[in-house]
Image: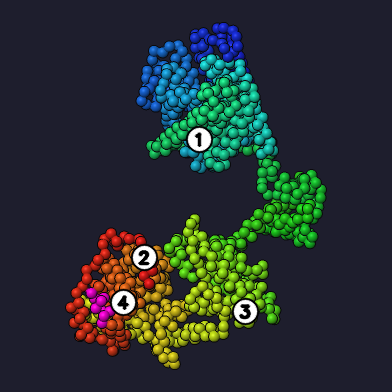
Amino acid sequence: MRSQRLCSTHVVWFLIVAVFSAPYAYAESGLPGDHTISPAVADIWMIVVAACVMIMQVGLLFRSAGSGRPGNSLKVARTNLLGFVLAVIAFAFIGATLAFGQSQVFPFGTGPGLSLFDDLTSGQSALIIFQLMLGGVAITIFSGSVAERMTPKAFAATCLFVAGLVYPVFLHWARGDLLFPNLTAFLANLDFVDLAGGVSVHATAGWVALAACMAISSQDKGAFFLRSQVPGRNAIFSAAGALLLFVGWVGLNGGFAIAYGGSAPAVIVNSLLAAGMGACIGSLIALRTDRQVLPERLISGMLGGLAAVTAGAGLVDVTGALVIGGIGGAVAICGNLFVAHRLKVGDPMGVVGIYAFAGSAGAVLLPLIAPLAYLPAGGRLEQLWVQVVGVGINFYWAFGATYLFFRILDRVMLIRREENAQDGRDEVIAEWSRQYDDAERVAALAKATFEAIMIHRNGIVVDGNEELAKLVGRPLPDLIGRSIFDFLRDGEAIRVSEIIKLNDDARHEISIELPDGSMVPVAARGRDISFHGEKARVGCFVDLRERKEAEKRIRYLALHDPLTGLPNRVLFTESLNGIMAHAGDGHVFGIAMIDLDRFKDINDIHGHQAGDAVIREVSARLMAAVGPQDMVARLGGDEFAAILGSISTEQDLEAFSKRVLEAMAVPIDIRRGEQVNVTLSIGAALYSDHTADKDALIGCADIALYHAKHSGRNAFRLFRCGMNDLIEKRRALEGDLELALQHGQFELYLQPRIDVQDASISGYEALLRWSHPTRGMVSPADFIPVAEASGKIIQLGEWVLAEAVGLLDGIEGHISINVSPLQFRHGDFVANLAGLLQRTGADPRRIELEITESVLIDDDARAVQILGELKRMGFTIALDDFGTGYSSLSYLSRYPFDTLKIDRSFVANLAIAENARMIVKTIIDLGTRLGMKVVAEGVETTEEALFLAHAGCHELQGYLLGRPSKVSDIARQIDPAIAVQLKHMPRRLPEIRDSGFHRDADSRLVGKLA
């Protein structure tokens, strides 16, 4: 140790003598800035300063050892020495030419040869030796971040790449005109200021280190940076290295000043002031964030100040040096925190913040602080632009090139050193370090934890941490010696005493009273411990205010519609239950169910964003129409509901509805310059005039809404007793449906489909009929909606499929079966069909399944999947009632339909509406072009049949050609007279051009077809 201190002392004195004797090397006296140096002395001085720069290597080596893990000093020293040697070789052979050679084409020097092995002047040799040393410094800086973690091969390859390419190429751009005029030294030609290498050396090394750390630190997560803040021998090594680095750095800056005609004393003074101010800022930051002056903060601030002032130490005055040094120190510390905690990158020496961030910040600050006369670009903004461009290019080149190099290198060889078990010596050192730290760890944990910790004995507080003081709202000294029950809410003392007796680890929620009387909910847990040799109890308290607020927010989100902020169905139901539970005799209030008219058209035509805008505006208008005792809720989609507590008569309900309808008469803006007219329908009921049951009350309002919808929309209807017949009828039908399935009251009727080409029967459509024992024949229009609403449609649909398949043996051709949307979307639909085929052995090619457009609209992706599976099984698929919905060509182009069925409403209007004939022709031509069979339903006259045949329709179906009949009564052929006319009717060729319709079209038919 004594020899090491003696060696360090000699080195420091050597550097001081070398630096401060510089002014005496001037050939003439006068002001330092005006000195002229003899070339021989300048060359000698350049080499002396280059040798002095070696002291920086020693400082960096100490810093690396101090920031590394115990026992790794030998590895760090070996790696740093290897890096320096490789950097010297690479720069001597390649880098010098790339940096200072002239070039007309390439963005780097190509000639003349400038390696140490060429014939050079003494000045050129001195300059190259000086830059060679600086290249070694850059590599040593970089190695401090990764020396412990990189494999030797990867580290050596990186050193050669950086010293032989990355560093010299940017040096060429920034200082490539030092020996010769150079067109490709574009930053130098723009008057980029980087006198002592703040950017070209230090920032380059920092960005290279960042790229290296990001490439190999995926498992470190900032741990190396945090580890550099440990106390003990590591901190001593780091501080000693920082001081040596400081002295060497001042010599470096002074050497630059003399080499390029500046004032060495002024540069040295500015460097000292900047370093000192950076250290002060680092101390202040440490006191504010860490409550103590950590050596790493002070060191980072000092070196950050030096890095910042390096680019222009000879251009600023004393004040400027202090400002740049202070900002540089702050930037270095904040930059390291950003790298460690935001980027999650391990950087044990803080290289990125000190050299990259602070060095770049100093170069950018220079135009704002240096005297205007010293700025070579002529003005502050001009110089600022040049500096920003130079710093940006430095980042993109140094970081980008190195990161790309690592990505490539990672494919060639292992980059990250595998973690091996520590040998015996490392274990001893690590154990010694752990024992050294144990004394402070408990106190540090108490200070660092985010929980409030209190130690009390028999209910009297004996110690705590700062978080406890913050939580209770009193200074910690005021807490010690007081009873814990002084801070509890009235009535909590007995419960807390019982909790203490339990001595369990469970969390208990209690309330703490603050000095202002407010209460803080906390989660408390504790256990008995031994404290200073006596029994005590430690308690941990977690502030629950944020969690309580979060729970309130979660409940709000669960009970409110996210688009409008209105209560949703759950809150609406809860509120209605609450009102009805507290409603006394004679209490009356209203409920309204509100539904937008044709809201689907708005979404389809104008898009879902327009639909959202309409929903928000409707919500606002509804809220404006109700009073403070009322509530408006969005139940879902375009459905709203209102609880009207301020309403007690039917006249009040009518007045409310009138206000809403009048408010909706104003068009709604959906986007700039575009409006839509929106109407709505309202159904309302009164509690308890109409009913006192919640579900029945909602049902009454729903029935009234149904009548409002079917009375022409944009209307209001109040529930009347006669409207309840629909509910009663539905309930009765629902009960009878179950019995009908059990007693076999359903039967399939068959209606023939006629092939227009030869007027023969091509197949039959199976139609479900219900023969009720008392009601007689029940219309499918009455019982199918009830079956769908009650869920019995699944069972009924399976019966229809099985019955229809059983009829195949008794008929010719195929059989067509209607599939309900609910049945189609049922999870077992495809599996049940497959089982039916397996049980019966039926040919699926003779079975046609008819679906409607609603199946496709509700769940597009699942519809594609199910239809694909049905096609693979062999079924044919028909799109039923085409044209009655908002028909899209995408249905026909995207889904595997075999048959297109024209709805009977178009056929019925053929004789009276020209547009109906045009629409029918369009559908026939469209289906034909897409390779589909087109079937027309509802054919009841000969004129309709002949028109459709002439238009190219493939099959016809209707009363003219055969009524639905029982299987025993089905027609086997059609009327011969009609058959003859159909056979001899000429067929029209399709008129649709390929450019108008094609299978890949995603456009829609203009408006609705009907």
Foreground: disc 2 or disc 1? 2
Determine crowd level at label 3: few under 14, some 14-19, many 20+ residues with C-alpha closer than 10 A.
Answer: some
Question: For the residue labelled by badge 3, is the local secondary structure a helix, a strand or a loop?
Answer: helix
* Residue 798 is at least partly visible in this image: yes
Q: Which mark is residue 426?
A: none
Q: Amino acid at mark 1?
A: Leu
In x, y percent, where is residue 424?
A: 55, 35
Mark earlier in primary sequence (2, 1) = 1
Residue bearing the label numbered 2:
1006
**Among the two numbered marks 4 and 1 on one chain, the one whose residue lies closer to the N terminus:** 1
- Structural crowding at the residue carrying mark 1, measured as other residues with C-alpha within 10 Å and reported as few (<14), some (14–19) or many (≥20): many
- For residue 210, above or below residue 753: above
Find the distance from the CA under tag 3 to the CA under tag 4: 47 Å
Q: Which mark is residue 910?
A: 4
Most foreground residue, 429 or 770: 770
Q: Identify whether 436 is placed above or below 802.
A: above
Instruction: Determine the CA span between mark 3 and mark 1.
Output: 75 Å
**Mark 3 or mark 2, earlier in chain:** 3
* Label 4 CA crowd tier, 10 Å (few <14, some 14–19, many 20+): some
Q: Which residue is mark 3?
A: 650
Q: Is residue 56 left or right of residue 504?
A: left
Are the two marked residues, 4 and 1, in contact with CB atoms closer than 8 angstroms? no
Amino acid type assigned to the residue bearing label 2 in the image: Val
Which of 894 and 986 lies nearest the eye of the viewer? 986
CA gap, disc 3 and disc 2: 44 Å
Which residue does the numbered mark 1 point to in the structure image? Answer: 210
| Total marks in image | 4
* Quadrant of the drawing holding the C terminus: bottom left
In percent of width and height, residue 973 lies at 22, 85
Question: Magenta span covers which residues?
Answer: 942-950
